[in-house]
Image: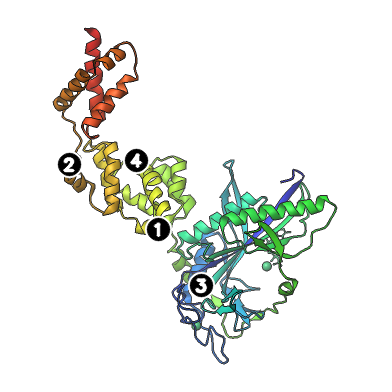
Amino acid sequence: MHDKYEAVIGLEVHAQLLTESKAFCGCSTKFGNAPNTNVCPVCLGHPGVLPVLNKKVVEFTVLMGIATNCKINSRSIFARKNYFYPDLPKGYQISQYEEPICEHGFVEIELSDGSRKRIGITRIHMEEDAGKSIHDISIDTLVDVNRCGVPLIEIVSEPDMRSPEEAYLYLSKVRQIVKYLSICDGNMEEGSLRCDANISVRLKGAEKFGTKTEVKNMNSFRNVERAINYEVERQIEILEDGGQITQQTLLWNADLNEVLPMRSKEEAHDYRYFPEPDLLPVVVDENWKKEIASGLPELPDIRKKRFTEHYQIPLYDAEIITQSKGIADYYEKVTAVTSDYKAASNWIMGDVLKVINEEKIDIKDFPVSAENLGELINIINKGTISGKIAKEVFPEMLKENKSPVEIVKEKNLLQISDASELENLVLKVIGEHPSEVEQYLDGKEKVFGFFIGQIMRQTGGKANPKIVNEILRKKLGEKKIK
Ligand code: ADP
Ligand code: MG
Ligand code: ZN
């Protein structure tokens, strides 16, 4: 970015709520059903039908409001946002306009220099989704209205972000929170989390905001950062050339790596908002608010801090482990079985997350139970098996969730800790390699590792490394004296 300028960014994030049924009717929200089957007269907007508000939608939205430090309005109203589009059979979308349910909140992001920054949340409101148009050149435009009426929340931020990185961090934080609350699966690629970016630039130190553009259609995290970067640079270039920014809506084209203007026809917005006459105001009294708040889980930042204090693990570990609620829950289950908290975080950050990322599975479907992983750590620490053997036992545990003790027994992997047995082995290996012994006695320390390697090979890795180390050092030392 040009040094003279700074970016000003505000995001509008849509999150699809994980309710079983739609916002105003009983139709299923299930993704992937045959097109146009999750429908009824209400979500199709037939004449004479009445919407009925899904209570869960309110609860999820209030939960998000509480988690993002918003004021929860005791009274809010729905509005009709009118526009014509083939995937919106009603001809309007039920949304909230003038009196949204949540306002004036904030989330905190952590910048790369470690400092924290508050990003204001202007409002969070409830609304319903529209259907999907599928533009297939070889056939025609197809419409699937299954998504009509699926509940969304829109989270509108203040124009508080000053770089594409900050926008990325903010979006990540919002995603992390909705996932922690289990109100949205946070999947950008599948469209359950969507983001529009409002972007302007101004000279550093200037007070007035510049003219903004709005970039839509960024369907991955990577694209959000890239699109904002692109648009910021584009605006700076125009200003540097003495031009002016035109307020417009742009679409990010991931294939071309650039933003393109939306056709102006689609952009001429006058939604003619008016209060939805078929729905009563939403009233959230203190009692209900308290009840919803009691279901608030420990939020990621607080949990991260607790992990560093209670389990004494590094901030780096805590950061990774609390990234997802499922992983953090798994960690706490492991630490209920073993008191080696650091080993637990090592195993999760390493072997567990590796499998989860490679197989693209959820921790819920991870084949090794937390109890068994905890037990594995315990038998390493007790000396039943070595850390090296543990790396052989773990893949067996992945195959079927068996207790590590059972696997060790079945595969005869018990660690050899018997001193006299190991002493014999050490003497045997020393006897077999006189020239290496010479080298060691000549001061070649490295040869020590060679002997360890030999002993490990002969025992199939089962020799207790600590004891072997001691005996080997002692025996080689005795040679030195002779
Ligand atoms: P509009 O009326 O065009 O929808 P809003 O005032 O509702 O604009 O703001 C929409 C979003 O744009 C908000 O996230 C807000 O923070 C952001 N925004 C407002 N003004 C600017 C600006 N000058 N530059 C960047 N973002 C802005
Ligand atoms: Mg707006
Ligand atoms: Zn319906």
Which residue in the protein does label 4 denote? 343
Marks 4, 1: nearer the viewer: 1
On the rendered structure, is 482 left or right of 77? left
Question: Residue pushed farthest front?
Answer: 138
The reply to whether dot 3 and dot 1 touch (C-beta < 8 Å) is: no
Residue 254 image-quadrant placement: bottom right
Q: Is residue 337 visible?
A: no
Disc 1 element: loop
Give whichever of discs 3 and 1 has the lower sequence position. Answer: 3
Whether label 2 lies within 8 Å of ligand 3 gets the answer no
Disc 4 element: helix
Amino acid at circle 1: Asp
The reply to whether dot 2 and dot 4 touch (C-beta < 8 Å) is: no
| Scheme by which the image is coloured | rainbow
The reply to whether dot 4 and dot 1 touch (C-beta < 8 Å) is: no
Amino acid at circle 3: Val
Place of residue 405 in the rendered image (x, y in percent of width and height, measured from the top left):
20, 46
Question: Residue pushed farthest left?
Answer: 420
Which residue in the protein does label 1 denote? 362
